[in-house]
């Protein structure tokens, strides 16, 4: 910005401030909600001067508000980071200790040579698995990084576990979780339950639909422990004690059944509630128990005239009403009898025994009248549970989710517009999947992958004619997904990062475990279910950590304490590529300057929430020596080949014997130059997506530049996309799961139905074969407060936490939210520093007092970097980063690993801590 | 005729705004849009012309509601000028030390205002609110210059530097005539005028007039993801502004007792039902005390809230409400009044403006 010119008038000066000489479309390629905001980026003299919402979207469904303007305060301040003081402009090598902040500037050539040498050393000493990348939802970085790691044979840690955005409960019930409604579908709801979610913070461009639904006649209720920032515009706020949401949901279910409000036809057809279970073990009655040649994945319903009938795995439509009460005596193939009953009878019994509104009142706090009132509304209206990723971060979040889904299943509340619940999906764009897999440039290369996948699906469906198209996609994904290089980080954390000891603290874990964590671990590995994905194995420790747009140190539950102590010393080289100094970059050996979003071409996260794919253009040249990820990784390939040649190394193999060459690494990675820079890479991805019909014909990088976005032409081809299981929406809002409800298509579960019973012995032993309430285990010891969190309003994870403009929209630093009376009782003043500690660790943070915070609860919002806390360590230090032993089950039907899905994930909510004021520094 | 300013009394037309406080989620997008566009020059560090604060709360500047100004019994009153601490913001940070200074953990990133830890900021008491758990409450209040019909700042200025534009009623300052007397700051009861210590002039929200003259809506309105900010001419009888302010009379001025006849109006906020001691829900009441809302919007607020509740009951019973449909704003452009032009024509050339994006990097 130029300084004021005295010769000009006031009017001239202000007019000049909005001048630009170039306007391009842009977006912010990160993991927020709902994402894909088309923006105008205005540049002048090679610098971005302003950006704003493009607001160019049309009405999708008549009578439903359009999605404009799609923007938030972070997007509006995005360009401030381009020349912020923490911008990385040159390659750096640390000149002191890791984390000291002492650097020397080096050239790109030196930086890449050092990186290449470290990688070759690691491969020579251990193998390519010793080169580790933590995948990240910085989408412009993730795709090139994943492709590079596949070319190298390195280890990529599964992003859905490292950030923990995986809703295990949804997978347990539906066999999938990557489906979600479009945000305008909220407008159709009669009841919106905001649960484990804080949409005022985390769903900024979608929030208006919730209020607009209210103006249309919907009832909106917020269920949360605190008077959360999302409370202002709801009709009812229902406070709950942390971790008791499952009991509340089950109480709703009890009322629905007891008052005869259930949609039993829906429940019979769509769920396992009409399947028969044994009264001795609680398990399903299986064909294998009735016939010597019977299958273990065939189940039964109870026909009023015919008695036992097989439950059709191929289709859900019923031409009879299964009996849902009573019991039946059945002869077993092995001899003897067993009494069986419909699962609903067992569920009803347990609800009546433990979860009536009055009984549940002892566990959580909602008044029985409130429970009845809301249950009735849910049963009578189209209900959508706006379920946040918060639930995934509770130890028993899967139980809570299963309970909520039971409520929806009993009331016919999914697979219809205005209903349901959503998970996390970023797989609608085939260009990404094809870019990761293709081995030849051009359309033929894309066709090869796409046609190959379709042929394999065809083959699987021929073998099993009960598979629908979607189930065929999922069967293929189960086969090939785990081999695609993404590993559940649970194994890395356990074997190489010091978490084995943490996970084996029974006093922090669920008391229902009958054996040590290690015994369950051993059994899980011996089952063979994790053979492909339990990597890197104990004898292949990590040596090189690549961080490209991610931030391992900031995000790993368990904190810097354990990673710096146990993982960091094993690493010979830590290389961080980013446009800002993150916590991980601060502790790295080499820091590489990345282009910021407005300095490169990239496509955003392809989600169903807006059904848009937006593009970010290179509005201005890269600052300093910043370069894009495709370009840098291509150069690294060349450097690796060069250094390998100098050492006389030609090839190597990984732990499974797969062979990798080094001399052709560049051409394998870039496909002879196509993936050597971002513009070319994006053009290739777009052309491939058009080729396979995923994007409309005629879409090119140029049409993106003219329009800023496109809608899709059809669902992506991977199972993660076809999980939507709905007609591709034309001129209407999108609600997933419609094919199951409208067409009777089976679900990708063991029983082919939405499944509330998990009759695995571990689940039964743990009291979790059916949805139930269980108290959160004391993850961190016996302490009087519970620390929880949530995503912040002012940053998408950490990437905006140091934006100088956004820092002024709050106090410019982390804070601990504490109830005002709790604070007064402990002599804690607003804005004074406090110490928070438990058996795991401690940290120091300024307090913020409020009557909106629940007594006994503390909140630190997610995203503050360790370097923002006094002492340099943040709230992660008190989180043990426990995983749930039941998520180690890997061979029960639909409970098996596929990338970004079923796996053990770390928890960070409900951490017992204590808090006290500390002396002010003089 | 409504008791609020009738545009025919003022010389010329009046652009006005309505904020529906039932949709504001406190995201700060309006504040940041304005900040990024207009106040990034030296001397403007503390200037946030648009702020969004949690109410009840002390606001920005801190305790501005007690600082005086405006009119009493028809006479101009000069109140206080907020101190730099009370305004807050304009912080500097120690990124250089933290990332490049070689101090390791001994330093951490922290804000500094004039070398000291800040005591206030543009949104310091965010999400604290009032009441007692579990019935605590708060809502969000966006504020900016009200471009008043009786602007105390214009009358107070000893150098005749301020005026009201005829074409749209935007209150502007000729910074060449401004001598930094700061009478305007003392006169403004909303404390939405800021002093630029580098250039020795005052500054405030310019109503985005350089955008209005291009037909583009103000940055705050156009970038509100809550879709709650309406802009338009008060005398456009078919537009939502006129209907909300004059016809349905559900959009109220803030602190009408200040006497300046502001042209920014607010649909007051409903709030969730409170809980009784036994945690049952009392559906006969809302959490925000009516007296508090009356202290902000005057006694008319009660009738407005009742009206909103009746409309909600009606739509819950299956009826339609033209008022609520207007507040829904099915088409985003209905919020923008006549200012529906795009700020950029990608691929086209405007005078002094954009070039085609097919130009090479």
Image (tube, coloured by chain):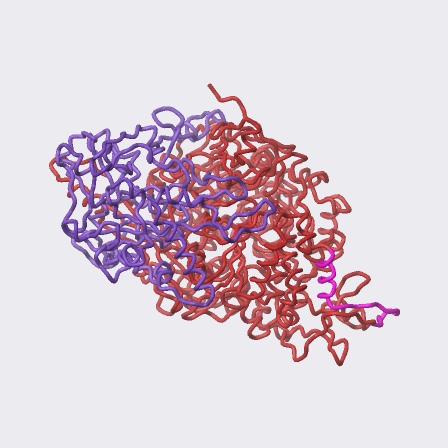
Chain colours: A red, B purple
Residue A820 lies, in percent from the top left, at 52, 34
Residue A116 lies, in percent from the top left, at 49, 41
- Can the viewer see residue A267? yes
- Can the viewer see residue A460? no
Left or right for A521, reference A13 = right
Residue A113 lies, in percent from the top left, at 45, 39
Left or right for A751, reference A546 = right
At 51% across and 69% down in the image, what residue appears?
Answer: A726
Frontmost residue, A284 versus A111: A284
Q: Is residue B268 shown above or below A778?
A: below
Left or right for A81, reference B282 = left
List the single residue furthest toward the left.
Answer: A7
Magenta span of residues: A330-353
Q: Is residue A356 magenta?
A: no
List the single residue furthest toward the right.
Answer: A336
Q: How many marks?
A: 0
Left or right for A565, reference B233 = right
Residue A45 lies, in percent from the top left, at 23, 44
Q: Is residue A344 magenta?
A: yes
Residue A173, by quadrant, is bottom right
At 28% across and 33% down in the image, what residue appears?
Answer: B68
Frontmost residue, B114 versus A91: B114
List the single residue furthest toward the top.
Answer: A922
* The N terminus of chain A - image quarter: top left
Residue A741, by quadrant, is bottom right
Frontmost residue, A356 versus B120: A356
């Amino acid at each position: 910005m130029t300084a004021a010119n005295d010769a000009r008038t006031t009017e001239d000066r202000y007019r000049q401030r909005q001048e630009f000489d170039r306007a391009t479309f842009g977006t912010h390629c990160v993991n927020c909600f709902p994402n894909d905001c088309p923006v105008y980026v205005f540049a002048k003299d090679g610098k971005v001067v302003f950006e704003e919402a493009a607001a160019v979207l049309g009405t999708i469904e008549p009578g439903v508000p359009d999605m404009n303007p799609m923007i938030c305060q972070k997007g509006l301040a995005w360009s401030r980071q381009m020349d912020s003081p923490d911008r990385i402009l040159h390659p750096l090598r640390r000149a002191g200790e890791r984390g000291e902040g002492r650097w020397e500037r080096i050239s790109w050539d030196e930086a890449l040579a050092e990186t290449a040498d470290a990688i070759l050393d690691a491969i020579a000493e251990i193998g390519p698995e010793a080169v580790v990348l933590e995948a990240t939802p910085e989408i412009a970085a993730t795709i090139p990084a994943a492709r590079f790691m596949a070319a190298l044979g390195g280890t990529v840690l599964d992003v859905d576990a490292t950030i923990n955005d995986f809703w295990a409960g949804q997978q347990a019930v539906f066999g999938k979780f990557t489906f979600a409604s479009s945000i305008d579908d909220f407008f159709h709801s009669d009841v919106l339950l905001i649960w484990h979610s804080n949409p005022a913070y985390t769903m900024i461009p979608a929030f208006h639909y919730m209020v607009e639904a209210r103006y249309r006649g919907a009832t909106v209720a917020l269920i949360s422990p605190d008077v959360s920032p999302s409370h202002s515009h709801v009709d009812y706020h229902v406070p709950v004690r942390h971790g008791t949401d499952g009991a509340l949901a089950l109480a709703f279910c009890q009322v629905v059944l007891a008052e005869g409000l259930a949609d039993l036809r829906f429940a019979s057809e769509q769920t396992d509630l009409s399947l028969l279970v044994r009264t001795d073990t609680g398990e399903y009655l299986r064909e294998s128990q009735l016939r010597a040649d019977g299958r273990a994945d065939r189940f039964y319903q109870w026909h009023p005239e015919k008695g036992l009938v097989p439950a059709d795995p191929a289709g859900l439509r019923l031409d009879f009403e299964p009996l849902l009460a009573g019991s039946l005596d059945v002869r077993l193939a092995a001899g003897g009898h067993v009494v069986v009953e419909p699962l609903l009878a067992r569920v009803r019994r347990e609800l009546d025994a433990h979860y009536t509104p009055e009984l549940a009142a002892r566990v959580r706090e909602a008044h029985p009248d409130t429970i009845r009132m809301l249950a009735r509304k849910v049963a009578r209206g189209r209900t959508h549970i706006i379920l946040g990723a918060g639930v995934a971060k509770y130890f028993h979040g899967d139980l809570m989710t299963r309970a909520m889904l039971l409520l929806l299943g009993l009331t016919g509340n999914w697979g219809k517009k205005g209903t349901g619940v959503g998970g996390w999906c970023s797989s609608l764009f085939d260009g990404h999947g094809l870019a990761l897999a293709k081995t030849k440039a051009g359309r033929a290369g894309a066709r090869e992958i796409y046609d190959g996948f379709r042929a394999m699906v065809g083959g699987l469906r021929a073998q099993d004619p009960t598979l629908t198209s979607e189930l065929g996609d999922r069967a293929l994904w189960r086969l090939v997904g785990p081999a695609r290089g993404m590993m559940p980080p649970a194994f890395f954390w356990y074997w190489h990062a010091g978490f084995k000891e943490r996970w084996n603290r029974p006093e922090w874990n669920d008391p229902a475990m009958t054996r040590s964590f290690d015994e369950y671990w051993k059994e899980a590995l011996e089952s063979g279910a994790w053979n492909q994905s339990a990597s890197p194995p104990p004898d292949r420790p990590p040596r090189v950590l690549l961080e490209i747009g991610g931030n391992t140190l900031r995000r790993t539950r368990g904190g810097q304490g354990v990673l710096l102590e146990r993982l960091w010393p094993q690493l010979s080289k830590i290389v961080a590529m980013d446009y800002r100094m993150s916590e991980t970059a601060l502790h790295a050996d080499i820091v590489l300057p990345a282009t910021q979003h407005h300095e490169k071409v990239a496509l955003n996260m392809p989600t169903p929430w807006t059904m848009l794919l937006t593009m970010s253009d290179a509005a201005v040249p890269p600052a300093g020596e910043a370069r894009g990820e495709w370009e840098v990784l291509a150069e690294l390939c060349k450097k690796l080949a060069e250094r390998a040649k100098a050492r006389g190394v030609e090839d190597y193999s990984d732990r499974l014997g797969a062979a990798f060459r080094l001399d052709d690494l560049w051409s394998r990675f870039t496909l002879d130059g196509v993936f050597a820079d971002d513009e070319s890479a994006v053009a290739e991805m777009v052309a491939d997506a058009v080729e396979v019909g995923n994007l409309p014909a005629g879409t090119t990088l140029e049409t993106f530049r003219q329009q800023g976005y496109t809608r899709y032409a059809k669902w992506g081809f991977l199972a993660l996309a076809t999980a939507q299981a709905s007609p591709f929406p034309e001129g209407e809002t999108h609600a997933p799961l419609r094919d199951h409800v409208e067409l009777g298509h089976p679900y990708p579960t063991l029983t082919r139905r939405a499944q509330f019973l998990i009759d695995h012995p571990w689940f039964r032993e743990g009291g979790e074969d059916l949805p139930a309430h269980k108290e959160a285990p004391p993850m961190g010891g016996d302490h009087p407060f519970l620390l929880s969190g949530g995503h912040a309003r002012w940053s998408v994870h950490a990437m905006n936490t140091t934006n100088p403009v956004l820092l002024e929209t709050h106090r410019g630093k982390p804070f601990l939210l504490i109830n005002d009376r709790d604070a007064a009782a402990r002599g804690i003043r607003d804005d004074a520093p406090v110490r928070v500690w438990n058996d795991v660790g401690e940290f120091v943070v300024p307090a913020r007092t409020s009557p909106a915070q629940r007594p006994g609860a503390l909140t630190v919002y997610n995203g503050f970097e360790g370097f923002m806390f006094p002492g340099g360590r943040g709230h992660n230090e008190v989180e043990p980063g426990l995983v749930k032993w039941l998520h180690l089950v890997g061979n029960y039907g639909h409970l098996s690993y596929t990338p970004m899905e079923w796996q053990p994930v770390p928890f960070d909510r409900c951490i017992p801590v204590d808090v006290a004021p500390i002396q002010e520094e003089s | 005729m409504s008791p609020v300013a009738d545009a025919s009394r003022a010389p010329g037309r009046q652009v006005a705004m309505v904020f529906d406080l039932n949709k504001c989620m406190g995201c700060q997008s309006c504040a940041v849009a304005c900040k990024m566009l207009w106040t990034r020059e030296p001397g403007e560090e503390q200037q946030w012309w648009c702020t969004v604060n949690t109410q009840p709360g002390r606001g920005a500047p801190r305790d501005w509601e007690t600082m005086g100004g405006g009119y009493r019994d028809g006479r101009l009153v000069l109140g206080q000028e907020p101190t730099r601490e009370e305004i807050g913001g304009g912080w500097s940070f120690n990124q250089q030390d933290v990332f490049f200074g070689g101090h390791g953990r001994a330093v951490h990133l922290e804000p500094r205002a004039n070398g000291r830890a800040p005591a206030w900021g543009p949104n310091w008491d965010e999400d604290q609110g009032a009441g007692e758990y579990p019935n605590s409450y708060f809502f969000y209040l966006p504020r900016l210059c009200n471009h008043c019909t009786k602007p105390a700042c214009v009358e107070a200025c000893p150098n005749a530097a301020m005026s009201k534009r005829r074409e749209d009623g935007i209150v502007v300052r000729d910074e060449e005539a401004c001598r930094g007397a700061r009478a305007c700051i003392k006169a403004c009861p909303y404390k939405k005028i800021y002093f630029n210590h580098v250039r020795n002039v005052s500054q405030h929200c310019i109503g985005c007039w350089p955008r209005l003259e291009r037909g583009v809506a103000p940055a705050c309105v156009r970038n509100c993801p809550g879709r709650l900010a309406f802009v338009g001419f008060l005398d456009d009888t078919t537009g939502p502004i006129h209907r909300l302010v004059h016809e349905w009379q559900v959009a109220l001025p803030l602190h009408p007792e200040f006497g300046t006849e502001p042209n920014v109006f607010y649909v007051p906020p409903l709030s969730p039902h409170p809980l009784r001691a036994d945690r049952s829900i009392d559906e006969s009441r809302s959490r925000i005390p009516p007296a508090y809302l009356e202290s902000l919007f005057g006694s008319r607020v009660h009738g407005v809230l009742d009206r909103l509740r009746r409309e909600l009951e009606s739509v819950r019973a299956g009826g339609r409400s033209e008022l609520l449909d207007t507040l829904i704003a099915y088409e985003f452009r209905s919020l923008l009044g006549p200012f529906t032009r795009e700020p950029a024509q990608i691929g086209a050339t405007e005078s002094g403006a954009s070039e085609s994006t097919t130009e090479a990097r």
